[in-house]
Image (cartoon, coloured by chain):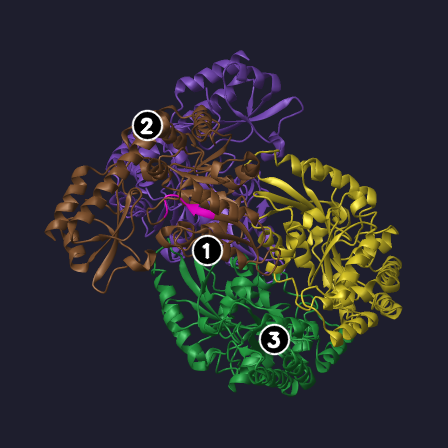
Chain colours: A green, B brown, C yellow, D purple
């Protein structure tokens, strides 16, 4: 009954096996190995597009470095108010971006609207040197509230951003979950919708530490080798990340894992809907479930062994926020979550 | 009828004379001259407190450098949503602060409340490494909407900030105007109310380029000589700024100038109140007047020679925002504004 | 016959096993797991001292972040001219240190002398704001030329640095090799000799990606949690690094591996000495061997399957530099090098 | 007898008069005034080339900002070991350049040679991500030792730099002196010789605080407005710098002042040559004279009222360095130095 986060899960057997095999072999340092080259080619296939791929060890590094490729003096990065880059990365983007500013925008259900984005851009008059300049829009897919942007939504937001010469970055820490939930191709919600650079996450979906910065226009990545190296993200045993992705992609392992996590999320949401004891704060798209429940119920769930994080009430739409004696909690399923975990939670909820 | 900004005014005669005299004399470089030492001592008298004073050439530099003295990794600077450091300095604070994050907070009439500040701080859980940490609260005095914080308001906000180990910075680009408007001593609205570091501005009130970073605890300034020098703000002919402040402080010239500007502001506000053609969006405290008027009236004023800046409607409280065919404008008086300027505007408004 | 680098080796079986086991288990994110706590305690035992330990994924990150804890405005980091931080990390220390300057100092055999350090410090007059200020001395142990500083040498250099308020950092990418070569305790060449912060490397000695920043005064590390997180080095599955170190330290595995690598280095050096075809450019202390040989010999070795890197002639003392038709090469042994590898090289050299 | 520095001089009467006049007038802020536009046009005339000109308040800012326009990740700026940017600006270039590295190169007489530059570049293998990449060569004209690069020397160095995609920056804090000394046109030693961006200094030659960043390809300056503003160098009363340059350029005032300073330098050098008590350490090209004299002579000169700075012996060629009881001193003349000042020094030297 551990729903704390999908990054509490271990690694899947295929990933462990691939890693162990690569570790027994060793090989040329800093990405000069064959496995790295093979994985880079695999990314191009998956995205049906020429890409420049750089493996890194953390999602924070992927986000901050990916965005930094678009840094300009006075640069402003627009994102959702609760975006990971804005409130959970301790300022990585300003650091790697040489002083970039983050501008958080409100949006219900974790999603930005073109209206809100346009308003935020309007507050940065074009060419007005005092205000700085928009350099990137960062979208989180899945969002921090477990919802997903459709290809059309991404495209509409990207269009608004690009009118102002801002690049489009996608924080795909849970990209597999989004692809699985939306039933679209990876290309559809990235470059075909206007995304320039993607943080492609494997860590939350069965890898150990495997993230990739994927540029859809290799020209944008011309300086990125230097940028990654000076960020301490150019690992000597780079094959260690490549091996994880190799297993991750083989036989659609990545999508199978994500689909499983999403099914467990749906099962959990159904249990909550039917419980009569709690309600959903947001309609979940994938593996993150936000529920409102009476505080005593929450405590009894904990006592029964459920692990979860309380969440800030501000995150969810006003209409669904917890009342005076209620709390908002986040429950995350993963590739490791079993139906029994979910059913156990459901039973504990029923009993609470 | 030029009300564009108080930084469009020239320099006052005493300032020009002092500058010319110092320029004829020259002297030791980088603040080794007697005038600099005298002016530093004068700051201590004016603030009735030991101070460490560093002269710089611009308000942006004063703000960003002053705040940077409190930078820590993951540091967040809290300020009003429309604070100059947040929207008008092109990211100087993130640059000089090595990646500091700015977090703008909404507040009616340009002023933060303790409630809003507490809420913003609550979103940065103490010791939560992902969120970063509050390192400074920056208050603008006069605010961007021409209002002023009372000593009690500053003290209350400072107390909230300091509970979270955040330093208190005051952007005093219009500090003289605030002192004159509030009728308080400089000490009352700074260190006695909990301010750690002040950007003390002379440029908008009759100087040419004269700003000072004033630390009320010299211990905080131990690294500041290096910080100022590497920022390109340690001028070789530092006496050039000292000479301006020397004249500025002599015989209360600074307060006389500010009082004049404030009187002109009040005269302008009265004219608007009585015009029947326009209304005040905010009750002005000093030399900045925000008025709402029908768009055609605004155009006729311009045609009659009035110079002013249109302003973002979002800046003013919802209740006083311009309607569909109205516009919000900012009018700024200065030490150079004459009663005739104001009366000319009043007449043009009456005729519009 | 692969002597390219010790970072081309794979990972040892105990490390792979520990990693696989931890990966099957998973656990609390961001270092909240038991393994991380156990490993932190183990560091304290090994160093016989209270320590603050932070696991990171790369040596570059360990170096740049560790040093950044001592950053001050105008800060200068003194190091050997060929130190990894100076010429092989693409500016990581300036980036993480918010603009720190690197000042490379010449020193024969990869080692700094107190005389050269004193001279370099003398060029930064104390308190002279234009020059900046020394904030750290960084020593590499083993050095870039495969030599080792004795405890007395470290202590003497540290004393010179501390007279100028500079912290002492040790780049211990090959720390195990140094401990093994010198036959001293880890404490002897670190805190007992004046080292404040150590980059403790496991990657080159049988781990996959396991580095630690070790502060010997936890007070110095008060801000480091934030610093690591914003650098993208606070990994969610931090247990992945902890598991490697757990195996690394168990039953002196780390020292056994280093001793083996050093023995192979000595065997290689002996083969070169006796070959009559090549000579040693520097007397090796551990697992790095720098040899000078005629260019045709180098080519025949390559043809015979030897893998090595040519090295810059400037690195070695003038007296031992390659002549007109000679080349300098670096040969690195590792825990994975077999006596047969070395003997194969010796035979190829004899035949060349 | 004050030869401390040319930045100890005051401002010339034409500069003071122009400044006073502009200060009485005031005008649009942030460079929107007519004077700024006129001065920008004047720069284009003087350099016989389209230019993008940005006025700033200090030479350190001009250098660091100008160079920052060419910053790339892992960027290395090559310069003379004693260049102002390397040892006298407290790390401004690393700060404004987002972590740029400075690489000081030895060169006799304050001048770099193409051989030394080529060697330094060879140590940064092309495309080798660990080493970083050269982004700029910075030449000081006049050099820190008062010598001058000929147009051919600049061109030769620029060619070497550009083969490696490094931009060429010229620190022209004493540019007027160089133009006067070399008898060349401003164009000849800048863009015609391959210079991309020039820090054009007025402060040391009769202005108060007037420096300009001059880009010879306006495309390079596309982001510079933002960069200057966030550096706190976009002054609201920008006309204050423009007014100084307006007077500076009128009727060749700048060149007249520089020629005078150079004549005084030559007179001083002649006096030293003929004194029998001291010798020149470097043949002066303009207004900086480096002399070696017995320590007691130096003390007696001081007692007689001479003001000068002792200088580091390392700066001058080995052959002319001070012996055991000798000292190296720097004497700087300026537009304000009178023949009587020089003759007084000569007399004091004779008497010493």
Residue A14: x and y in percent read 71, 82
Mark 3 and mark 1: Cα distance apart in space:
29 Å
Q: Earlier in the sequence, mark 2 or mark 1?
A: 2
Mark 3 and mark 2: Cα distance apart in space:
70 Å
- The correct choice, above or below, for B159 with respect to C204 in the image is above
According to the image, label 2 marks what residue?
Answer: B20
Tag 3 and tag 1, C-beta contact below 8 Å: no
Q: Chain of mark 1?
A: B
Let me know if residue B141 is in the magenta part. yes
* Image mark for residue A331: 3
Element on which disc 2 rests: helix
Q: Chain of mark 3?
A: A
In the rendered image, is residue B335 in sight? no
Residue C39: x and y in percent read 78, 61
User: Which quarter of the rendered picture does the N terminus of chain C lie within?
Assistant: bottom right
Let me know if residue D19 is in the magenta part. no
Q: Give the mark toward the camera: 3 or 2.
A: 3
Q: Chain of mark 2?
A: B
Element on which disc 3 rests: strand
Residue C141: x and y in percent read 77, 52
Is residue A85 or residue B26 the one in the foreground?
A85
User: Which quarter of the rendered picture does the C terminus of chain C lie within?
Assistant: bottom right
Q: Quadrant of residue C21?
A: bottom right
* Image mark for residue B116: 1
Q: Which segment is the magenta one?
A: B138-143
């Amino acid at each position: 009954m551990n729903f704390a986060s999908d990054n509490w899960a271990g690694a899947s057997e295929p990933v462990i096996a691939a890693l162990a095999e690569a570790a027994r072999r060793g090989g040329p340092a800093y990405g000069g190995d064959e496995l790295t080259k093979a994985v880079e080619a695999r990314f191009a296939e998956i995205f049906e597009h020429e890409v420049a791929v750089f493996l890194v060890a953390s999602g924070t590094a992927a986000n901050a470095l990916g965005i930094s490729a678009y840094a300009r003096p006075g640069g402003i990065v627009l994102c959702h108010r609760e975006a990971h880059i804005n409130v959970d990365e301790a300022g990585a983007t300003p650091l790697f971006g040489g002083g970039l500013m983050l501008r958080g925008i409100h949006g219900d259900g974790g999603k930005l609207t073109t209206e809100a984005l346009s308003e935020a851009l309007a507050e940065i008059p074009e060419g007005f040197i005092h205000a700085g300049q928009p350099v990137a829009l960062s979208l989180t897919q899945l969002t921090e509230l477990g919802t997903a942007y459709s290809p059309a939504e991404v495209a509409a937001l990207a269009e608004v951003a690009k009118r102002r010469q801002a690049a489009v970055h996608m924080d795909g820490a849970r990209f597999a979950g989004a692809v699985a939930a939306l039933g679209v191709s990876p290309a559809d919600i990235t470059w075909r919708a206007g995304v320039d650079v993607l943080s492609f996450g494997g860590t939350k979906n069965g890898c150990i530490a495997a993230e990739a910065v994927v540029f859809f226009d290799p020209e944008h990545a011309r300086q990125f080798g230097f940028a990654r190296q000076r960020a301490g993200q150019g690992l000597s045993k780079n094959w260690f990340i490549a091996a994880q992705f190799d297993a991750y992609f083989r036989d659609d392992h990545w999508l199978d894992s994500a689909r499983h996590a999403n099914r467990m999320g749906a099962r959990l949401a159904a249990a909550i809907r039917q419980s009569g004891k709690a309600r959903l704060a947001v309609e979940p798209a994938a593996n993150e479930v936000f529920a409102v429940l009476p505080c005593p119920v929450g405590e009894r769930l904990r006592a029964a062994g459920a692990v979860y994080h309380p969440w800030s009430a501000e995150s969810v739409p006003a209409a669904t926020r917890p009342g005076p004696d209620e709390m908002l909690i986040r429950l995350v399923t993963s590739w490791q979550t079993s139906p029994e975990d979910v059913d156990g939670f459901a039973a504990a909820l029923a009993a609470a």
